[in-house]
Image (tube, helix red, strand yellow):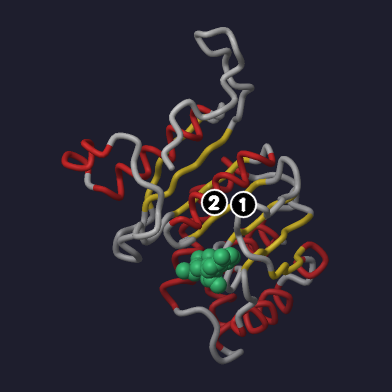
Amino acid sequence: MVGLLDGSWPERLYDAHDSCHGGPRAGARSESFEFFPRVRRRVRRPTMVDLCAGHGLVGLIFALCEPSVTRVELVDARQPASFERIWTAFTAIAPWVAEKVSYREAALDESLRLPTEAGVVLAHACGGLTDLGLDCAIASGGLVAAMPCCYGTARGPRMPALSKSFGRSANIDITRSCRLADAGYQVDWTHIPQAITTMNRVLAGWDRQPPRPSPAGGVGSQDPHPVD
Ligand SMILES: C[S@@+](CC[C@H](N)C(=O)[O-])C[C@H]1O[C@@H](n2cnc3c(N)ncnc32)[C@H](O)[C@@H]1O
């Protein structure tokens, strides 16, 4: 682990990865390396799930850097060829990654079940996949961090009129944040550098508390204002 703490390990991974010829494009690599430090304290749990994982970099970085993370499940509809290459690079540098990580080919839909109380990450899960991923995280009692990308298939905002002031994508993320807050999460937003991607907003739902009783006396565990 010592070499990981001197700050050189991303470069070493890049080098090792490049020597494996291919893998995720440089931008996606940087996105993952920027996303990780912004969410690690918020969502770190012994079990992590990387939804719409693609090359799996975010989950792999958790496995590599976080000793308290003992299991990482990468989930994607299809394991891309780039995963094998980045896996080779990671396990060469950090052999302990191999025993933590599994890749599950599964569609992200309403029927997907996640391990309970996991830390769930969604890095650029397209459109409505981010919404489905938040649903799955909430249902499983997990913590969750998402860096949304395109919004074309995303669920609409709760208050469409706000799009005039904030823009549609921010308004959709406000609605997503409200859903997390309604489910008992602390919610905050951060950003990775815009120079890396303009889809750089990061939503984190953490420190989940039991939902407060609703004014009507029932437990407000259901979103009172469903948006779809
Ligand atoms: C833009 S990529 C993001 C990959 C990676 N997380 C990243 O940070 O670069 C979106 C991923 O979602 C996956 N995907 C698309 N539809 C899906 C579905 N219905 N269920 C699960 N994964 C899906 C794709 O295979 C692709 O790997």
Rendered residue at 49%/61% (across/down)? 125
Residue 2 position within the rendered picture, expressed as x and y whole percent measured from the top left: 70, 61
Disc 2: residue Cβ within 8 A of ligand 1's nearest atom: yes
| Rendered location of residue 117, percent (x, y) | 72, 40
Residue, disc 1: 110
Which quarter of the figure is the C terminus placed in? top left
Judging depth in this view, the residue of 26 and 113 nearest the camera is: 113
Residue for badge 2: 132
Quarter of the rendering containing residue 94: bottom right
Would residue 141 be found to the left or right of residue 32 on screen? Answer: right
Foreground pick, 212 / 60: 212
Residue most extreme to the left: 164
Q: Quadrant of the N terminus?
A: bottom right
C-beta proximity under 8 Å, tags 1 and 2:
yes
**Residue type, numbered disc 2:** Leu
Secondary structure under the numbered disc 1 in the rendered image: loop
Amino acid at the residue labelled 1:
Glu
Give the crowd class for mark 2: few <14, some 14-19, many >=20 residues within 10 Å.
Answer: many
Residue 58 occupies which quadrant of the picture? Answer: bottom right
Q: Extreme front residue here?
A: 228
Mark pair 1, 2: CA separation: 7 Å
